[in-house]
Image (cartoon, rainbow, N blue to C red):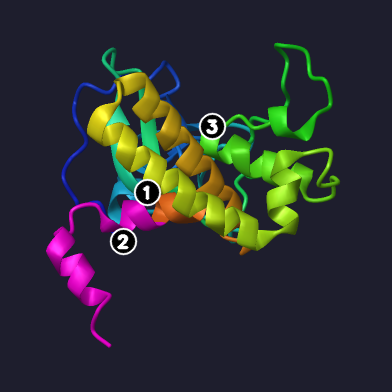
């Protein structure tokens, strides 16, 4: 995927070393995947190839993310901040981004102080955090955790989706905005837990939505009804 061959905007403010800071942000979840530096050539290569390129200060050379590990960052767009001294690469990661094997380089929680609970370690979206909570609850007993009771009894989770969808429709018809938000949260919660039982995460759903952006809803729906 190429982003096009347009020239770089002249208002990028490179530092004295000819570099600018680049933040790689997951286009589907909003998670900050990594931060690195890029020079003019790295940005041009990113735009030409659609894969994230940076400049390594330690090795003094251009590098493509994933050139050794295969964990590339597919770039959808490049954004410049208001001061012109920082860029965002909006990316779809292939595999983990951090060299430690973690999805993001930001996993060392410093404030509030880490309690060791896995579900508070997520630095990404609330949906990714919920995915982590689900994983943490898989080994819990049903009488100890409501989420575990759903995970251990998939039919109960499916029934709750139907129940919560009906309650959301009722709220949309005749109740206040706070109630609508509450019922929507309940529906999302139960749907995401049920999907996790099947091994489908919120990130999987968000990437599907990302792939549909710019596509007519009528066309997309027809493409799923060919058979």
Up the image or down, 181 lies above or below 1; here it is above
Q: Please report whichever mark, 2 or 3, sits nearer to the chain's N-terminal start.
A: 2
Q: Residue at x 61, y 38 (%)?
A: 130
Residue 111, quarter of picture: top right
Query: Which of the numbered marks, if any, corresponds to residue 126?
Result: 3
Give how far across and how far down residue 44 sits, in percent. 31, 44
Q: Which residue is mark 2?
A: 1
Question: Which secondary structure class fits the magenta region best?
Answer: helix
Q: Are marks 1 and 2 in contact (CB under 8 Å)?
A: yes
Question: Residue 223 magenta-drawn?
Answer: yes
Query: Which of the numbered marks, if any, corresponds to residue 75?
Result: 1
Position of 112 compared to 52: left or right? Answer: right
User: Foreground: 11 or 118?
Assistant: 118
Q: Secondary structure at mark 3?
A: helix
The quadrant of the rendering that contains the N terminus is bottom left
Residue 149 visible at all: yes
Position of 83 compared to 154: left or right? Answer: left
Q: Which residues are magenta?
A: 208-227
Up the image or down, 5 lies above or below 174; here it is below
Residue 179, quarter of picture: top left
Up the image or down, 75 lies above or below 31; here it is below
Query: Which of the numbered marks, if any, corresponds to residue 225?
Result: none
Q: Secondary structure at mark 2?
A: loop
Q: Please report whichever mark, 1 or 3, sits nearer to the chain's N-terminal start.
A: 1
How much space separates mark 1 and mark 2, taking CA atoms?
Answer: 8 Å
Q: Residue at x 15, y 68 (%)?
A: 219
Give how far across and how far down residue 14 sits, in percent. 36, 21
């Amino acid at each position: 995927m190429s982003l096009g061959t347009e020239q770089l905007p002249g208002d990028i403010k490179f530092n004295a070393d000819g570099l600018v800071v680049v933040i790689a942000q997951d286009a589907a979840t909003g998670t900050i995947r990594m931060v690195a530096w890029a020079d003019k050539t790295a940005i041009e290569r990113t735009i030409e190839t659609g894969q994230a390129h940076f400049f390594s200060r330690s090795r003094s050379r251009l590098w493509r993310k994933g050139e050794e590990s295969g964990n590339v960052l597919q770039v959808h767009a490049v954004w410049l901040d208001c001061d012109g001294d920082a860029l965002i690469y909006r990316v779809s990661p292939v595999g983990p981004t951090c060299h430690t094997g973690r999805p993001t380089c930001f996993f060392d929680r410093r404030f509030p102080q880490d309690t060791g609970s896995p579900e508070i370690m997520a630095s990404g979206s609330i949906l990714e955090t919920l995915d982590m909570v689900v994983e943490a609850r898989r080994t819990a007993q049903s009488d100890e955790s409501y989420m575990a009771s759903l995970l251990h009894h998939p039919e109960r989770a499916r029934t709750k989706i139907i129940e919560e969808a009906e309650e959301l429709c009722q709220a949309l018809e005749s109740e206040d905005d706070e109630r609508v938000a509450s019922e929507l949260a309940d529906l999302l919660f139960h749907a995401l837990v049920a999907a996790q039982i099947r091994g489908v995460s919120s990130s999987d759903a968000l990437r599907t939505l990302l792939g549909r952006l710019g596509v007519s809803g009528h066309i997309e729906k027809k493409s799923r009804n060919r058979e």
